[in-house]
Amino acid sequence: MTDAHNHLQDARFDSIRETVVTEMLEAGVTRCVVNGTCPDDWPKVAELAKQYPDLVIPSFGLHPWKKPADGWKEQLLYYLDAFPNSCLGECGLDRWIKDYDIDLQTEIFTAQLEIATERNLPLTIHCLKAWGPLIDVLESHELPKRGFLLHSYGGSAELIPRLTKLGAYFSFSGYFLHPKKAKVLDVFREVPSDRLLMETDAPDMLPPENIITHPLSDELNHPANLIAIMEAASKTLDTSLVNSNFETLFES
């Protein structure tokens, strides 16, 4: 089973990470994309990729919640060069956060998009309340030929064909199994089966209590919950191609 998006490097896992990884493997999680968010956590992502090369696919990106530091692009290129199997992300646009600067976000996201396109890297995109600006960027730039991932997709059903035409994959989070997210589940029914992926976004996006197989303190989401998330989602969605979609986007 493959996890298209998590943050195994997160400091909240520091004291339990070895146990978490062991439990992931025992549960049947075979591959996961671990997403960096800024230069501060890229070294931890890199270390995990070295420590667990059969499990972890490293991804390095500058998240729209993070302020760009001097030299961030050069550091990003360093890590992408150091790990030939790496991805680019998590990056994107966000108008949900307070005092957002969409112009600066767009500049930084576009720079990362251009790198991913030039190198044909898997690209993981975060988008909250910024679908118009995101579409504008995607439709006005060259894109990676292999496609890109819209993680924890929260856009409308109407946008799915338009985004699919551009090369989008859409990952489903266990958090969307909460009854209050029923409308999001309805949207995912419109995602083509050959563009659907599964993710945990661990340690965040905790699924409903009845789905949790690996509880953690402080309401953290364990990446090993992925198996139960997949089983629950399969009752509503066609998940038959999830693992092959992962291979196509991230490993081909």
Image (spheres, helix red, strand yellow):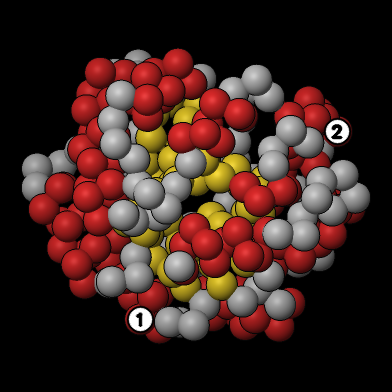
Q: Which residue is mark 2?
A: 179
Looking at the image, is mark 1 or mark 2 earlier in the sequence?
A: 1
Nearer to us in this view, 154 or 118: 118
User: Considering the numbered disc 2 on the image, is that residue within a helix, a strand or a loop?
Assistant: helix
Image spot of residue 94 (x, y percent) = 42, 26
Say the numbered circle drawn on residue 50: 1
| The C terminus sits in image quarter | bottom left
Picture residue at 62% right of the left edge, 47% below the top: 195
Q: Taking 188 as reference, is 40 above or below it?
A: below
Q: How many marks?
A: 2
Give the secondary structure at mark 1. Answer: helix
Q: Position of residue 181 (x, y in %)?
A: 77, 31
Which amino acid type corresponds to the residue marked 2 in the rendered image?
Pro
The residue depicted at 22 percent of the width and 50 percent of the height is: 118
The crowd level at tag 2 (other Cα within 10 Å; few <14, some 14-19, many 20+) is few
Where does the N terminus fall, quadrant-wise?
bottom right
Instruction: Specify few, some or many for label 1: CA neighbours under 10 Å numbering under 14, 14-19, or 20 or more.
Output: some
What is the distance, in whole Å, between disc 1 and disc 2 at their CAs?
39 Å
- In the rendered structure, the answer to whether residue 3 lies left or right of residue 128 reads right
Residue 239 quadrant: bottom right
Q: Nearer the viewer, residue 123 or 40?
A: 123
Image-based side of 80 in relation to 144, left or right: left
Q: Position of residue 13 (x, y in %)?
A: 52, 65
The residue shown at (44%, 40%) is: 125
The amino acid type found where label 1 is placed reads: Lys
Occupied quadrant, residue 236: top right
Asked if residue 181 can be seen in this view, the reply is no
